Amino acid sequence: MKKKSVSLVLTTINSGDILDGYCLQAEKEGFRDGLQIIVIPDRKTPEQIFQKCAQVRSDGFQVKCPTIPEQENYLQKFGVFAALVPYNSDNRRNIGYLMALESGNEVLLSIDDDNYCTGETYETSVLVCCDQAVTLSSVHSSNGWFNFCEMLHIEPKCRFYPRGFPYHKRHQDPKVTFAQETGLVRMNVGLWLQEPDLDAVTWLTAPVRATRFKGESFLLGNDTWSPINTQNTALHRDVIATYYFVRMGYPLAGMPIDRYGDIFSGYLSQACIRHLGHRIRVGTPVVDHKRNSHNYLLDAKGELAGILVLEPFSEWLHELKLEGSNYCEAYLSLADAIDHQVQYFSGSIWTDATRGYFHQMTFCMRKWVKVCRLIG
């Protein structure tokens, strides 16, 4: 299998020491020349990030680290979309995604700035998102949802779920079966040791530690879903057209929605991948997730609106049939379906403002496709 080209994308509020492990691993695995690093600073990012990127560049790696004015100039060529990327937000990683698409590299690897390389073979996440079908064990769950946190050994021993997993599907005991299946993988979901990606409610009530990965990666069955975030997630360049990081910060029924932009982007991409008959692999490589400082009470306040709207939204999305023969068309079909469906969701969270938020989301989705098509 030939070596692939990959763009590693992150936003950061740190000084960039996280890059050392990924560069060392790329050197060890011999894909330095195929690696492009794209760091998107924000207004809160310390100046040291530019020094770190300069040092990594001097070591022979391809590195982009645009200043705020350079980012603004870059966005201007995309017209209206420039106004849709807020400051002091994870949403700015969208700039890095567009740069990755523009680079022509075959794979995007999205990480958070607290996802540290463990020394595992990161080429796995690149090679698997290729043009060659793979045959792997595939997981199928009787209730349509698989908790991939069960792939980790944790302390203390208990059942826990990844951020974004629907609450109405938790604490069930679905029948889980496996079958050998073959397909084109278009997304690879790597997991996390130490502090897994859980929601704030879980961190407040039952904090855990992931000590090791159980050792087997597999495909998600065509009938089986799980939430996907932007931490240690690799995708084929075609999927970028569906991986828009959704804007947060809007008040829904008096609660500002936050910390779920990546969860929405993961679900929306997942719907398009499944529609086109492609596959999602879950497991390796794993990262050490050394979480940045968090106030979990404030996190819970920001996450509650996302949890509430995802309860019916995820169930509806699970059954939705899309149209389109490529990722752009499927994503536009999804935007149309969301615009239609939000009128029918009910409950205290589903106010006119909430429906307006989803209409704004679909407006941004359409602009995102327009920009991706412009890039090519």
Image (tube, rainbow, N blue to C red):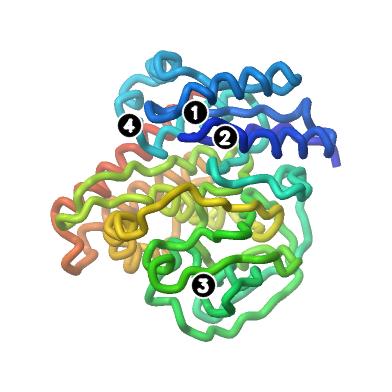
Nearest to the eye among marks 3 and 1: give it: 1
CA distance for labels 3 and 1: 34 Å
The answer to whether the residues at label 2 and label 1 have Cβ atoms under 8 Å apart is yes
Position of residue 338 in the picture relative to residue 20 (left or right): left
Residue 195, image x and y in percent?
Answer: 55, 59
Residue 39, image x and y in percent?
Answer: 55, 28
The answer to whether the residues at label 4 and label 1 have Cβ atoms under 8 Å apart is no
Residue ID at (37%, 26%): 43
Nearest to the eye among marks 4 and 3: give it: 4
Write down the residue under mark 2.
9
Position of residue 23 in the picture relative to residue 176 (left or right): right
The answer to whether the residues at label 4 and label 3 have Cβ atoms under 8 Å apart is no
Kindly identify which numbered label has been placed on residue 40.
1
Write down the residue under mark 3.
145
CA distance for labels 2 and 1: 8 Å
Mark 4 crowdedness (10 Å alpha carbons): few <14, some 14-19, many ≥20 = few
Mark 2 crowdedness (10 Å alpha carbons): few <14, some 14-19, many ≥20 = many
- Mark 3 lies on a secondary structure that is loop
- Mark 4 lies on a secondary structure that is loop
Mark 3 crowdedness (10 Å alpha carbons): few <14, some 14-19, many ≥20 = many
Q: Earlier in the sequence, mark 2 or mark 1?
A: 2
Write down the residue under mark 4.
86
Q: Which amino acid, by three-letter code, is at mark 3?
A: Trp
Q: Earlier in the sequence, mark 2 or mark 4?
A: 2
Residue ID at (37%, 51%): 259
The answer to whether the residues at label 2 and label 4 have Cβ atoms under 8 Å apart is no
Q: Which amino acid, by three-letter code, is at mark 2?
A: Val
For the N terminus, which image quadrant?
top right
Q: Earlier in the sequence, mark 2 or mark 3?
A: 2
